[in-house]
Amino acid sequence: MNEFNDNIEKNRDSGQETPRKPRRRSDDGTVERRVERRRTEGRDGERRRTEGKDGERRSSSRGEAPRRRVRTEAETQERRRARSDGQERPRRIKLSDEQERPRRTKASVEEEHEGRAKVSAEEETRRKRRPAAKSKHSDAANRTAAIVSLTVLALLVIGVVVGVTVFGGKLRDGDTIFPNVNVSEIAVGGLTADEAKALLDEEGWNMRVGGTLTVRFPTDVKAEIDYIRAGNSLTSAEAAEAAFAFGHSGSALDCLVAYLENLIHPVDVSGTATVLDDEYIASALSRAVAEFEDNMHRDKEYTLNTKSGLMTFLKGANVATYDVEELTKSASEALRARETKLEIPLPTTEIPMPDFDAIHESLMVEPADAYYDKESGKVVPEQIGANFDVAKAKELWQQTPVCQEVDIPVAYTLPNETQEHLESLLFRDKLGDCDTAFWGSSDNRINNIDLVAQKLNGMVLMPGESFSYNGYVGERTEEAGFLPAPAYSDGSVIYEVGGGICQVSSTLYNAVLEANLKIDTRTCHYFTVGYLPLGLDATVSFPRPDFGFTNSRDYPIMVKSWTDRDKMTLYFEVWGTNLDGTYVQMKRGQWPIYDPEYPDVQTGWGATSWRQVFDADGNLIDEIREAYSEYHLHDEDIHYPPSATTDAG
């Protein structure tokens, strides 16, 4: 053992290979083969490391990865000659099994281990570098493969897109409904829209889905809203259009997807959402609200019923109403729920309580009859004396719901005449009339007649009120519109401004007689007139003679007068109230008047008129001598005997 260690030291100093410590050999030579293999691996590793470094240097200069150096032919031949000349590297001496091998020192073992580790590290470095060189070729191959794969994939995608576009486009542009589409339980797949509508009409679709929503308001007002007109149900035409619309809109892909889904799952379009026609709904509700407001309208705050002894209010009158927009929302919700009835609650409008204290104060007055106001031409309402319990009235008001009547007991003191009764009587009956012709009259005379007739038309006389012709018509002047025309004056016929108006006063006189009114003043003409019988005329001149009468009836009278130029006639009517139905007929008598000295010479005419009053049954109940009239003949119409002329001369 010491000898072996001494050999190691000598070899280390001389630079020769140190013989290894002999190991025990197995019978089959396993240990020996293992040792030889390790020596060979060590030499090869050293050679590879040297060649690797040379290759790295050469490769680095060219920018390439290091490659293993290959011997040239000349180097190979040289190596062979050296071996033949005995210059080959000395080989290790293989010890015999009997020969004891020198043992290695601890330092040699550690050195051996370090060498092996260094060889392993260098081998690992070369291993890592070799794949790096190969990766460039692998990356190029991978890129080529990726490009090919992507190209194939792109072609496949393009093919799919083209196919989807073509087929989906045909589905979208087709004229028939998708195969598995229904309207409720009615199958319409494969039909055109027109064919689907015809099928739905045949099945009575509109009758099945139609209906009415009845909206009821207080005061028995209601609105009927048709389901189809409101847009809540699809008509047969709309249902057919909805069925056709399924899958026939959007992109080609959308149509294809809808088609494929429809093949698996049936589609029912009867529940397709519709847009309600708010304008139609609001219109129907507006009419109902207007009717409700009419029912709630009152001209008076309250009414007094003397028969029932009640003062009646309508709670909410002229105030309660509804918001049509809110009603439309409620009706729309009811339509979507397919309800048939909708009860509208009472209005929520704030209803103020009447001022019962002020009403009580106003009613606590003496009763007064209604009367006709001549200036306004209207009847002033009656005034009823009444009394009621104010506290009780307020209590009843609070207990009564809106839109209902509030009846408050009242103790009444009634007037004798009410507005309603008086209006029903005023100017109801024609009491008398008269018409006269003015044929042959000049235009000026007709102008004067027409002017006065217009002034008198519509004249009203209250009970007990008197009328003066001159006072009402006024002085006849050209400034007032009158024109010169023939007239009687002091026994002569002259042209006078306002000529002809006596025909107006005479015609009015006869109408007043028939109306059974009291005549205040009347004068007959100096000469007879041609438009009325004797005794029935009334002459006027300003300021006198005048014609006047008084309304001796219990109700107002009204005079109506006008002219008809086509018939050349003047008309007068007196209207009033004839409660008992009595009427008047005029009776008259006339006779000639003779000159007292010449009994055979007529100088004029005398006449008397009587007013005969009959009851409604035609019985004469009164006869009054009305007037005596005396007329003169014109001088040319008086024929005295010649002796009378001689005597006069």
Image (cartoon, helix red, strand yellow):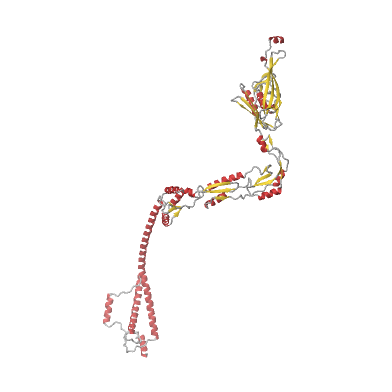
Whether residue 619 is visible here, answered yes or no, is yes
Seen from the viewer's position, the closer of residues 512 and 93 is 512
Viewer-proximal residue among 57 and 113: 113
**Residue 558 drawn above or below residue 598:** below
Question: Furthest residue to the bottom?
Answer: 2
- Provide residue 41's location: percent of width, then percent of height: 34, 80
One can see residue 63 in this view: no
Q: Position of residue 226 (x, y in %)?
A: 52, 47
In this image, 45 relative to 309: left or right? Answer: left
Residue 614 position, x and y percent, is: 67, 28
**Quadrant in the rendering for residue 369:** top right
Does 83 sit left or right of 527 as displayed?
left
Q: Residue at x 26, y 81 (%)?
A: 84
Quadrant of residue 27 within the rendered picture: bottom left
402 relative to 373, above or below: below
Give the quadrant of the C terminus.
top right
Residue 48 vs residue 96, the one in the foreground: 96
Percent from the top left, x then y, of residue 42?
A: 35, 80
Up-down: is 181 above or below 142? above
Q: How many marks?
A: 0
